[in-house]
Amino acid sequence: MEPAAGRRPWAPRAVPPAVPATLLTALLAALPYPVLLAVGTALLNAQPARRRAAWLAYASTDLANLSDHPVTALLLSAFVTEGDLLAWVVLALAGLGVVARSWPLPGALWRPPALAFAVHVLATGISQGITAHRIATGGLPPGARVMTDVGPSYLVVAALVAAVGYGTRAGRLVGALGFGVLAPSLFTGLGDLDVAAVGHVASIALALPLGALLVRRSPSS
């Protein structure tokens, strides 16, 4: 059928080309998590000692909390740290920024934090699942269901590993340097199946395959 006079034939709407994020855009996309981590930690540290301890106990992703309020614990635990806040903020910004810089626009900037948080959830499940198994088999006392297990390390490790795996040449160098800073402290107690050490191994193992899934779903593919 011929189009009516004066009308242009129908054509599908053009899809904007996928282009890499600019450095500024990538840093802005990476900024919310480090800022929320800083705010959460500042709020925690501003509390009197007894209330601070109570907040930490509630936010911890130990087995007791994962049985009682898993979603809240998984969320809160990612936004506080008992370690060097400035170092974690810088490393989080570097890792997430590199990954955001590497994946094309439009619509991809949600993927780096989504990747990091997915690893946080899964690595917590693996590390605490091993603890639950050891308690059930007599390898640990029942009291091991309660512990302080908070912090950004699973997310940040995942972001840095993904930066090494999927970043630009310069981005991979940034990721490798950041991971190198953390590496000496990541695996302490691994031989004894320490919860944090197991979680860090899980974060490394999960970051690359989950990152590959997100890269495969990018607008440029």
Image (spheres, rainbow, N blue to C red):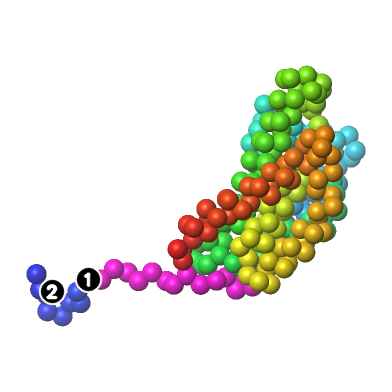
* Magenta-span inclusion, residue 18: yes
Total number of numbered discs in the rendering? 2
Which numbered circle lies on residue 136?
none
Q: Circle 1 is placed at which residue position? A: 10
Check the image and name the residue furthest to the left: 1
Sequence-first tag of 2 and 1: 2
Give the residue at x 63% y 40%. 122
| Quarter of the image where the N terminus is located | bottom left
**Element on which disc 2 rests:** loop
Q: Which residue is mark 2?
A: 3
Q: Position of residue 195 (x, y in %)?
A: 77, 36
Question: Can see residue 22?
Answer: yes
State which quarter of the image contains the C terminus: bottom left
Please check the rendered image and state whether residue 165 is part of the magenta-colored stretch, yes or no: no
Q: Amino acid at mark 2?
A: Pro
Q: Is residue 36 left or right of residue 41?
A: left
Check contact, mark 2 vs mark 1: CB within 8 A: yes
In the rendered image, residue 113, in percent from the top left (x then y), is placed at 62, 54
Q: Nearer the viewer, residue 148 or 210?
A: 210
**Point 56% across, 61% down: residue:** 109
Q: Examine the image and state in which quarter residue 199 appears.
A: top right
| Closer-to-camera residue (219/201) | 201
Tell me which corner region of the image, top left, top right, bottom left or bottom right, holds residue 51.
Answer: top right
Instruction: Establish if 77 lies above or below 85.
Output: above
Q: Which residues are magenta?
A: 10-26
Is residue 29 among what the camera can see? no
Instruction: Give the main secondary structure of the magenta stretch.
Output: loop
Please name whichever residue, 112 or 209, is drawn nearer the observer in this view of the structure.
Answer: 209
Q: Is residue 80 above or below residue 171?
A: above
